[in-house]
Image (spheres, helix red, strand yellow):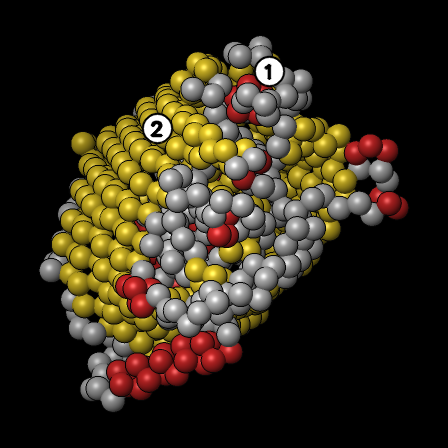
Amino acid sequence: MQKRGTFSLVLLLTVFSLFATQDLVDLGTAYELVIAETPLSEAETNTASSVSVITQEQIMAYNAQTTAELVGKAIGTSFNSVGGLGSLQTVVIRGATSSKNLIYLDGVLLSSAHDGTVDLSIIPIDIIERIEIVKSGPGNLGRTNAIGGMVNIITKKGQQSETPFSLSFENGSFLPLAYGTSSSRNWLSLVDSQKLDFSYTSEDIVATIGGLAAQNAYTYKDDTPIIKLRKNAQVYGINGSISYNKDISKSMNLSSNSYADYQDLAVPGGYVINPLYDEGLTPDDYSKGFNFNTTNKIEVTDVNELIENVTALASYNFSRLFFHDEVDFYNGMVTTESTHNKHKASAQIDAKWNVGQTYVLNTGLLYTLDYVDSTAIGKRTRHTISSSAHGSAYFLDGRLSIHPSLNIAYLSDNAMISPNASLGIIYAVVPNTDVKASISYAEDVPTFSALYWPGYANPDLKAEKGINVDLGVDTKIGPLSYESVLFGRDVINAITGNTNIDHSVYLGTEQSVELELAEQITLQASYLYNKSYDLSGGNTFADNVEVWGNRNHTAKGSLFLTLDRFESVVSAEYLGATSSLDSAFLLNLSVNMQVNKKLKAYLAVDNVLNTSYELTSGYPMPGTKIRIGGTVRF
């Protein structure tokens, strides 16, 4: 492990030194390559919500492989994964797992009533402009809250460019390593994965098409000392998107965003012992998935003296998943297949009212249809009608602001009325120092899968209800920015699998600091402490029973360096142990080089130390991977 990590470092330094011997041209000052953690960030719009924003510049600097990895860069967030590129990846926010978090694409909810989760691996990084992660309250979405948090992925918009076409490419390599009882090596690991994306950008249109192929044939260790090779974990995928944005008149804007993705995947590649196959991999298992999403919006400004602007939006999402599974029942193979078609359509209208200089009022009405046709759970339908209002009031010349929100929804399949509400307060103690506090209430109803899946369902599941409380302070003194947040979450009837946890509580703190050491050097460090208590079954705080799978400690740090045409980042992450996972320390390197005005190249080394770790029990994550890629514009 140590030799492999050392080799990666030597390779990186060698490439860097070769580049450094060339004649360099100063391309100007660098962007501020840090993840925003302030209450005045673009995502919060003065709601007192706890929010992180990952910008386009940060996306380009990190060169992350997947959207989930980008989301995991922010403090308070992480992700679960069942393996390498193309595997299922879902977000975790302050200990709240995927079904308790809401995922939005351009402000439109992707989370489905089928299973409540969204696989972030199907959203390619190339179409993303920025990511907003809301960890408490409604953020700028305004309409609702979540038991855990929310992720809003904003796609790229058109702009004028002298080079409207771009071609991005990448090759990913695992260094060949002897595995098994012999000295065999898998030399094809040097070309394990490839990604290719082509895009066109004009003032009104952004169009992309791309694809990936990966064998995910990396080595790993399980509970035995023998190094094994991950098998039957390949993925092949293709995706395309088109975004159109046009000002029809001075007061009317039309925008349309459509995206499609197809993936052909083998099994994730666990190592549960199977008497028929080494490492528990059934070579005939596979799955196929197709996803299509379209959102169309019209915005009218300066409607009249009473209404400042009105937005009307219609969206539709279709997802089809097919699974082929072969299960070993006492050395007899049983083949099962299942198909799941998911439809989600919504229509909404939002209005911003003209109520004066010191007040802001937004209202909205939303209708959503969830329809599922599944060989496992049958045909299920849920109609949801919700009405929302959120706003702001400013006092003391803007130093004090109050931000309430309310959402009331009706769900047809269980004839349930579900309220959500929040209240945020921001007070500017002195210039560049703010104190903020927020409290929010949210409800989450059981999914169709939890209610109806054969052999798994629990029709008696109750809706979960949660309260989130935040108290924080942030300040900026010259080159130093610091934020401290104390948070608490109280959840009644938390849904875990097919059961309810009667009562659970999370208490913790987030600490983050950013320091601009020089114009070319920025340092970011953050720490999350998240203590959980399972208070079901008569447990008390004194019993100190933790919620299963929760990490108590997470620490992250990044060092950004800009030197002439180079941008580089070293990022480290410590993931504390859970009840089922060991702790892990991960180190990543990324170096970008602006070769000329039209070509940008990068070298990324993931998991430099070749750490053996898991994000989901039984599914080993990749060791050291070296990725070389770039973007050419023309």
In the figure, is residue 247 to the left or right of 470? Answer: left
In the figure, is residue 126 to the left or right of 349? Answer: left
Say which residue appears at 50% left-offset and 47% top-offset. 280
Q: Is residue 318 above or below residue 89?
A: above
Quarter of the image where one finds residue 171: bottom left
Neighbours of disc 2 within 10 Å: few (<14), some (14-19), many (20+): some
User: Which of disc 1 and disc 2 is earlier in sequence?
Assistant: 2
Q: What's the residue type where badge 1 is placed?
A: Ile
Say which residue appears at 26% left-offset and 55% top-offset. 195
Say which residue appears at 58% left-offset and 66% top-offset. 225
Contact flag, marks 2 and 1 (Cβ < 8 Å): no
Q: Mark 2 points at which residue?
A: 320
Residue 510 x, y percent position in the rendering: 64, 56
Neighbours of disc 1 within 10 Å: few (<14), some (14-19), many (20+): few
Q: Indicate the quadrant containing the C terminus: top left, top right, bottom left or bottom right.
A: bottom left
- Farthest-out residue, front: 331
* Foreground of the two, 196 or 344: 196
Quarter of the image where one finds residue 296: top left
Say which residue appears at 40% left-offset and 18% top-offset. 373
Residue 190 x, y percent position in the rendering: 31, 67
Secondary structure beneath dot 1 equals: strand
Residue 440 x, y percent position in the rendering: 64, 35
For residue 417, the mark is 1
In the figure, is residue 90 to the left or right of 215? Answer: right
Q: How many labels does the image show?
A: 2
Residue 562 x, y percent position in the rendering: 36, 76
* Foreground of the two, 466 or 321: 321
Secondary structure beneath dot 2 equals: strand
